[in-house]
């Protein structure tokens, strides 16, 4: 029987296999690194999300990169913010109360993960340096996850340079880069073959796109945001969601190990905003019947006001599902958000104005939504 | 954990290969094999932690049974009942997980009671490790091998490169290799050769098979869901799926062979360019070779030999003997191979078609025997068209049989066959086909060009004995028109790096599960 121990006999003069192994590894990494140099159109990059639940992030890029209408307030965060804050309502209320036009854009996207928020924020500051306030999402306990779309929308160096330590998605995100870069390069060169479109007003959802309306998702079909619910219908899923919240396990001094993505990228967004003289705040929209206190509220409050809408949690008619407001409730919360901003002293003309670092309830429990 | 996952390639595999060799070279060399067994259990746990106890119990019980059988064999005492009992117990466990739901539903349908049971989750690799252990028990009973110790036996079964989807190895092929361990001077070469084989296998899976899946799956899905389908797209999908299954499973086998080689173990060959064969019988000598061999040793021969004797004793004549010694055992063996792939009528049809093809081939060969001899005697060569026509007909027949293999259920299979023969019109281009009909045709044609023209992975690595008995048994059997030979040189190291790079990069396109993990 033949065994593994025969290569030299077959090969004759042989180079050092260890040297050749090193060459295999070097060529592998060399090729992977070379893909970073492949150019592509960022719009093509964002269009990769079109068939996913993040399809509205294509609009986000269009709003930022192609629509020159200024942005005064940008909302960046999770699906609770996406479905819970109607930018047109908020901007109408602010414009009415201030007697001057104020532009609000809701750039939030489904799922948690501050790294994708940082990518959106980067595009925001690049294309709309005039922005005066950035409102970020906050939830009951900091998410530990990286955002699944980060690998799609971030620049390649940002993926390579992401925090490595205890970032469970780092390896997968990094491994995605070479194929992505090759694919985007080819799609940029041959857009028609891949159904890539150039920006035109026809497909654009518009400057004042209301993210709280019902929509057809490429992955979930029709999503009815007008729906009202009953307590019985929502309670089990809401309770299950609350049970799934894992509180911090490590002492706060070690939270950088437990929440590396959230902390790294929140700090980065705040630093970038401060460099531009832009204020930062946070919004918390609750799960049905569970207006949980923010466990890391002090961290967020260190950067700006934390607006909380715990008061809407008690009534099932406000929710389209266990964690998302329906459109009517979202419109009322958006108006309350505008009022709360003004109460907190936000002034659109003063770019560098920092808002008070405190918790600002949008309403009191039991108070009817106006 | 899957071979085509980044975590396996970047973390698990390097850690295990390094740990294994470091242990082998250290004063703790005694821990080398336990380390590999533990790594295998970790590997298996990632695929389905809940089935680790089942796997361990299966190994323990079969080992205990093998000791008892060996003891009886030494004393030349009757052991048929014990072997039968142990084999039946293995088949019972396999049957419960794999066939119970199907059986219950069939009984429900036949009796009109609608009786059914909840789907039972299939432990990954159970068909493979069950067959491998049954073979071991029978071999010990027959005295073909001497029963090994616990470590020998556990190393034989719990070897992660081939645990989940083969190759199905025989004990005497690997036991001594496991026992001996890696040779100090060969470690670097084995890792390099193994990595090259692994890279080729991964490339076949992620770049070729997964590309073909883009064109086969939409049509098979349409068949399952009642969507529109027509003649042209059905044939393209059937050809694409046939090539996909080949590249998927032979790619997996290459990865298993490469991974084992990195640990200094040479595994048996599992694929030898089967789609280049000129008969269905030949295909099955070159497709999933280790399963075919298993069925040949443990099913075909035990049926064929007594039947041949009985036919000869009764003076059954040429045709009678052919039916008894060849046709009946062949159809039974192919039915078992079909059903081994899964519980469902589609797999029965698949096995039956293969059995009928092979039977037809045997009848034809017997019928033409005299004419062939006369031709040979007269010094006449085969007509030039014979080879290509035989290959084309074989491929066409095999592709037809792949339709039930890939169909989700009987209805989907009927719809596929109907569409393949024009029931749905001439052409319907599925919207899901990336880049349309031209790309579907080009991708499928490219896959068959690779199959027919380029050397297979073992030919490429042929200088380094990539599989057991390569030089002795396999190297000359199916040479490809184009010869490419990997060498231990810098350009080939760069080519390996490029292959590995593309293979890993394409994982992230969205790799499908290995088809044979369903079995």
Image (cartoon, rainbow, N blue to C red):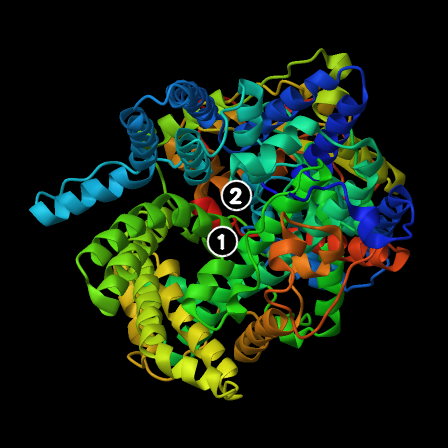
Mark 1 residue crowding within 10 angstroms, few (<14) / some (14–19) / many (20+): many
Q: Nearer the viewer, residue A234 or B303?
A: B303
- In the drawing, what numbered circle is on residue B173? none
User: Quick check: A56 above or below A1?
Assistant: below
Q: Residue at x 28, y 57 (%)?
A: B325
Q: Nearer the viewer, residue A355 or B38?
A: B38
Q: Nearer the viewer, residue A299 or A19?
A: A19
User: Quick check: A221 above or below B356?
Assistant: above
Q: Position of residue B286 (x, y in %)?
A: 51, 60
Mark 2 residue crowding within 10 angstroms, few (<14) / some (14–19) / many (20+): many
Q: Residue at x 67, y 41 (%)?
A: B259
Residue A338, located in which quarter of the rendered image? top right
Left or right, residue A302 beside residue B43:
right
Q: Residue furthest top?
A: A251
Q: Is residue B2 visible?
A: yes
**In which chain is the residue bearing label 1?**
B
Question: In the rendered image, which residue does mark 2 sit on?
Answer: B166
Q: Secondary structure at mark 1?
A: loop
Left or right, residue B217 beside residue A246:
left
Q: Quadrant of the C terminus of chain B?
A: top left
Q: Position of residue B518 (x, y in %)?
A: 43, 46
Q: Is residue B4 visible?
A: no
Q: Nearer the viewer, residue B192 or A159?
A: B192
Determine if marks 2 and 1 fall on one subunit. yes
Mark sitting earlier along the chain (2/1): 2
Question: In the rendered image, which residue does mark 1 sit on?
Answer: B288
Left or right, residue A190 beside residue B46:
right
């Amino acid at each position: 029987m033949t065994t593994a121990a025969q290569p030299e006999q077959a090969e004759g003069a042989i180079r050092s296999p260890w040297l050749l192994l090193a060459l295999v590894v070097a060529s592998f990494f060399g090729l992977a690194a070379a893909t970073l140099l492949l150019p592509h159109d960022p719009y093509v990059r964002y269009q990769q999300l079109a068939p996913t639940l993040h399809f509205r992030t294509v609009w986000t890029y269009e709003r930022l990169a192609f629509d020159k209408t200024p942005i005064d307030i940008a909302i960046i965060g999770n699906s609770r913010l996406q479905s819970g804050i109607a930018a047109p309502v908020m901007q109408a209320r602010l414009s009415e109360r201030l007697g001057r036009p104020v532009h609000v854009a809701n750039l939030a996207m489904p799922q948690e993960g501050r790294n994708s928020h940082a990518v959106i924020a980067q595009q925001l500051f690049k294309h709309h340096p005039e922005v005066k306030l950035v409102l970020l999402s906050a939830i009951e306990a900091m998410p530990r996850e990286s955002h699944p779309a980060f690998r799609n929308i971030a620049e390649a160096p940002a993926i390579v340079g992401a925090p490595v330590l205890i970032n469970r998605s780092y390896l997968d995100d990094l491994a995605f880069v070479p194929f992505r870069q090759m694919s985007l390069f080819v799609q940029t060169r041959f857009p028609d073959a891949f159904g890539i479109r150039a920006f035109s007003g026809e497909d654009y959802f518009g400057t004042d796109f209301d993210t709280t309306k019902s929509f057809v998702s490429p992955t979930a079909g029709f999503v009815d945001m007008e729906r009202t619910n009953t307590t019985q219908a929502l309670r089990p899923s809401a309770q299950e969601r609350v049970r799934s919240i894992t509180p911090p396990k490590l002492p706060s001094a070690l939270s950088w190990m437990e929440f590396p993505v959230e902390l790294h990228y929140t700090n980065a967004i705040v630093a970038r905003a401060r460099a531009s003289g832009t204020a930062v705040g946070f919004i918390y929209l609750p799960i049905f019947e569970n207006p949980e206190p923010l466990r890391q509220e002090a961290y967020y409050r260190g950067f700006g006001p934390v607006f909380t809408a715990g008061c809407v949690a008690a009534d099932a008619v406000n929710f389209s599902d266990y964690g998302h407001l329906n459109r009517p409730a979202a419109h009322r919360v958006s108006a309350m958000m505008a009022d709360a901003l003004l109460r907190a002293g936000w002034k659109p003309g003063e770019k560098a104005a920092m808002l008070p670092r405190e918790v600002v309830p949008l309403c009191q429990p039991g108070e009817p939504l106006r | 954990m899957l071979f085509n996952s980044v975590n396996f390639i970047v973390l698990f595999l390097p850690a295990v290969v390094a740990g294994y060799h470091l242990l082998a070279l250290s004063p703790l060399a005694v821990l080398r094999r336990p380390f590999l067994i533990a790594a295998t259990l970790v590997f298996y746990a990632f695929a389905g932690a809940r089935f680790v106890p089942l796997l361990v119990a299966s190994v323990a019980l079969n080992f205990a049974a093998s000791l008892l059988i060996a003891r009886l064999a030494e004393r030349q005492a009757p052991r048929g009942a014990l072997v039968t009992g142990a084999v039946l117990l293995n088949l019972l466990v396999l049957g419960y997980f794999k066939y119970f739901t199907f059986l219950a539903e069939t009984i429900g349908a036949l009796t009109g009671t609608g009786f059914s049971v909840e789907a039972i989750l299939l432990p990954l690799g159970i068909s493979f490790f069950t067959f491998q252990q049954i073979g071991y028990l029978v071999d010990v009973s027959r005295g073909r091998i001497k029963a090994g110790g616990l470590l020998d036996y556990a190393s034989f079964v719990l070897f992660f490169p081939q645990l989940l989807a083969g190759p199905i190895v025989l004990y005497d092929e690997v036991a001594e290799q496991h026992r001996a361990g890696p040779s100090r001077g060969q470690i670097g070469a084995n890792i390099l050769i193994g990595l090259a084989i692994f890279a080729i296998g991964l490339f076949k899976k992620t770049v070729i098979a997964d590309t073909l899946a883009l064109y086969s799956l939409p049509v098979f899905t349409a068949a399952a869901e009642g969507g529109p389908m027509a003649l042209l797209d059905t044939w393209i999908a059937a050809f694409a799926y046939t090539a996909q299954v080949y590249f998927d499973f032979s790619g997996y086998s290459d990865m298993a062979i490469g991974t084992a080689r990195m640990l200094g173990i040479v595994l048996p060959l599992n694929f030898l360019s089967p789609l280049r064969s000129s008969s269905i019988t030949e295909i099955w000598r070159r497709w999933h070779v280790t399963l075919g061999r298993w069925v040949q040793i443990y099913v075909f021969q035990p049926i064929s030999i007594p039947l041949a004797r009985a036919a000869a004793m009764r003076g059954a004549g040429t045709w009678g003997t052919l039916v008894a010694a060849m046709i009946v055992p062949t159809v039974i063996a192919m039915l078992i191979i079909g059903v081994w792939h899964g519980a469902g009528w589609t797999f029965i049809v698949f096995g039956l078609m293969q059995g009928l093809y092979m039977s037809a081939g045997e009848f034809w060969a017997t019928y033409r025997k005299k004419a062939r001899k006369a031709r040979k005697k007269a010094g006449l060569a085969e007509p030039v068209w014979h080879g290509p026509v035989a290959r084309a007909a074989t491929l066409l027949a095999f592709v037809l049989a792949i339709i039930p293999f890939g169909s989700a259920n009987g209805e989907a299979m009927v719809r596929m066959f109907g569409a393949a023969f024009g029931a749905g019109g001439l052409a319907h281009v599925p919207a899901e086909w990336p880049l349309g009909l031209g790309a579907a045709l080009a991708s499928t044609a490219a896959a068959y060009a690779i199959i027919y023209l380029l050397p297979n992975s073992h030919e490429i690595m042929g200088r380094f004995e990539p599989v057991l008995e390569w030089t002795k048994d396999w190297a000359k059997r199916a040479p490809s028109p184009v010869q490419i030979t990997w060498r231990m040189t810098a350009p080939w190291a760069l080519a390996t790096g490029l292959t590995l790079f593309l293979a890993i990069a394409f994982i992230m396109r969205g790799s499908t599960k290995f088809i044979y993990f369903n079995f």
